[in-house]
Amino acid sequence: EMAATAAQAALNACAAENHAVSVAIVGRDGSTKVLLKADGSGPHTGSSATGKGFGSAALGRDTAGLAEFIARNPQNAGLREMDERLVLQAGGLPIRIGGALVGGIGVGGAPSGDVEATCAGTGLDAIGAE
């Protein structure tokens, strides 16, 4: 239920800004718990959102920060190939409840990763996640 609440809040936040996106909640174990696609969202946005959520769930960091880390430290570029499900672009945030990493939320399809991360943050706020 919390996963659905977070995903819907993120989808609604982007829709309020006229962005047709997809939102995925991925559990700590890497399984997709929820995938919502707005009417009019692109065909690639579901896999983008899922990959960003997977990246944050697996690595416990926001995907924009991970992308910046790799850009600054090219010797770590192999992180991108660790798992074919990873999408290390802005728009994914880790989900922490009571300090414990429980998953990740990913948003795909907005005009920028910053917009996607803001929508994802609204999803986290809706469930009281850190």
Image: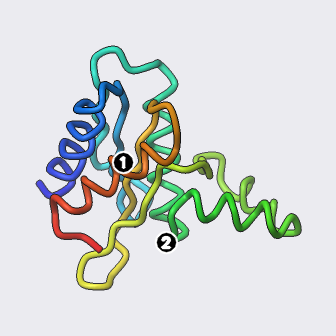
Asked if the residue under mark 2 is in contact with the one under mark 1, i.e. CB atoms within 8 Å, the reply is: no
The residue at 30%/36% (across/down) is 14
- What residue does disc 2 label? 60
**Number of marks in picture:** 2
Q: Amino acid at mark 1?
A: Thr
Q: Amino acid at mark 2?
A: Gly
Task: Name, please, the residue furthest toward the top.
Answer: 40
The residue at 76%/63% (across/down) is 70
Task: Answer with the quarter of the image where residue 28 lies.
Answer: bottom left
Where residue 81 appears, x then y in whole percent?
74, 53
* Mark 1, secondary structure of its residue: strand
In the displayed structure image, the side of residue 75 where residue 51 appears, left or right: left
Task: Name, please, the residue furthest toward the front.
Answer: 17
Task: Answer with the quarter of the image where residue 97 lies.
Answer: bottom left
Foreground label between 1 and 2: 2
- What residue does disc 1 label? 32
Q: Tell me the tag on residue 113.
A: none
- Please state, as top left, top right, bottom left or bottom right, where the C terminus lies in the image: bottom left
Where residue 68 appears, x then y in whole percent?
69, 62
Q: Is residue 17 above or below residue 62?
A: above
Where residue 115 appears, x then y in whole percent?
43, 43
Where residue 39 appears, x then y in whole percent?
28, 17
Q: CA distance from mark 1 to mark 2?
A: 16 Å
The residue at 22%/32% (across/down) is 16
The residue at 51%/25% (across/down) is 44
Number of residues whose C-alpha sits closer than 10 Å to that of mark 2, classed few (under 14), some (14–19) or many (20 or more): many
- Please state, as top left, top right, bottom left or bottom right, where the N terminus lies in the image: bottom left
Q: Is residue 10 above or below residue 38?
A: below
- First-in-chain label (1 vs 2): 1
